Amino acid sequence: EEEIPTCPLCLEELDSTDRAVKACQCGYQVCLWCLHHIREQLSARCPACRTPYEEQNFKF
Ligand SMILES: [Zn+2]
Ligand SMILES: [Zn+2]
């Protein structure tokens, strides 16, 4: 049984592109859509650890 990782915010499956982006060092992973949404509409902080999302910290 294979476990497909899903975005904890929108519950969509994370595809390989989503999973390739490490937005936060804590390992909390969201899809690119939610990542964009957080940066545009919300506080631009990781929902898990409150570390500011900054482009230079992203690992692609
Ligand atoms: Zn999402
Ligand atoms: Zn985090």
Image (cartoon, grey):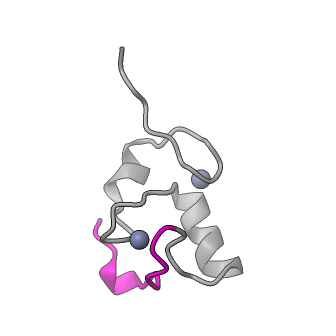
Q: Position of residue 48 (x, y in %)?
A: 49, 67
Magenta residues span 48-60
Q: Is residue 51 magenta?
A: yes
Q: Is residue 38 magenta?
A: no
Point 68% across, 79% down: residue: 42
Question: Residue most toward the top?
Answer: 1
Q: Nearer the viewer, residue 30 or 33?
A: 30
Q: Position of residue 29 (x, y in %)?
A: 43, 57
Point 41% across, 60% down: residue: 28
Point 30% across, 71% down: residue: 25
Looking at the image, is 58 positioned above or below residue 12? below
Looking at the image, is 43 positioned above or below residue 2? below
Q: Is residue 57 left or right of residue 48?
A: left
Q: How many marks?
A: 0
Q: Nearer the viewer, residue 23 or 60?
A: 23
Point 43% across, 38% down: residue: 5
Looking at the rendered image, the quarter that the C terminus falls into is bottom left
For the stretch drawn in magenta, the main secondary structure is loop
Question: Residue most toward the right?
Answer: 41
Q: Is residue 1 left or right of residue 44?
A: left
Q: Quadrant of residue 34?
A: bottom right
Looking at the rendered image, the quarter that the N terminus falls into is top left
Q: Position of residue 57 (x, y in %)?
A: 32, 81
Question: Residue most toward the front?
Answer: 49
Q: Nearer the viewer, residue 48 or 36?
A: 48
